[in-house]
Amino acid sequence: MLDIFIKTHFSGGHHLRNYPGNCEKPHGHNWKVKVTVRANELDELGMGIDFKSLKGHVNKVVDELDHRDLNDHPSFKEINPSSEHIAIYIFNELRDELHTERYQLYSVTVRETDTSGVIYYGG
């Protein structure tokens, strides 16, 4: 098995509804995202998945979040746009696109700082 990943980032604002502290106030982050695909075999070129293809799928999803108030995004109208929910959202958006007999989406990591983040493995 091989784990193939790309890293990207996006900037956006949010606030956490009903949070007992500063995060209830509007603020922003430069979120860092890592998407990992697990391949069980290589293609005829020796790749699990082409990085260019992986980046294309990921960028399409991340571009929907970039430079916006995440609380206004349809997926976060009823739930807080926490790092956890952002990771779940990205995973769910990519799950079908990144699933073949040779590989599948393995995890999505979302970090809101260099020292704090989450990894979602699907569920």
Image (spheres, grey):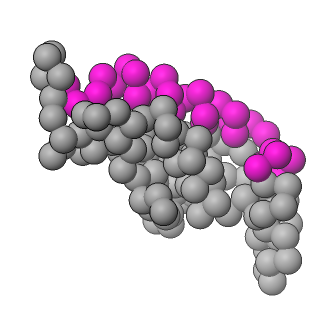
Q: Looking at the picture, how far across and down is residue 68, in whole percent? A: 79, 40
Q: Looking at the picture, how far across and down is residue 58, in whole percent? A: 51, 33
Residue 45 vs residue 24: left or right?
left
**Residue placed at 49% from the left, 37% from the top?**
96
Q: Looking at the picture, how far across and down is residue 71, in whole percent? A: 83, 53
Magenta highlight on residue 81: no
Q: Residue furthest top?
A: 45
**Residue placed at 28% from the left, 34% from the top?**
101
Would residue 50 be seen by someone viewing this image from the given angle?
yes
Q: Is residue 51 above or below residue 77?
A: above
Predominant secondary structure in magenta? helix
Q: Residue furthest front?
A: 101
**Residue placed at 76% from the left, 50% from the top?**
75
Quarter of the rendering containing residue 6: top left
Q: Pick the residue in front: 115 or 19.
A: 19
Q: Which residues are magenta?
A: 47-75
Q: Is residue 65 above or below residue 92?
A: above
Q: Looking at the picture, how far across and down is residue 47, in whole percent? A: 19, 25
Would residue 31 be seen by someone viewing this image from the given angle?
no
Q: Pick the residue in front: 17 or 57.
A: 57
Q: Residue furthest bottom?
A: 20
Q: How many marks are shown on the rendered structure?
A: 0
Quarter of the rendering containing residue 10: top right
Quarter of the rendering containing residue 25: bottom right
Magenta highlight on residue 74: yes
**Residue placed at 14% from the left, 17% from the top?**
44
Residue 3 vs residue 96: left or right?
left
Q: Pick the residue in front: 55 or 19.
A: 55
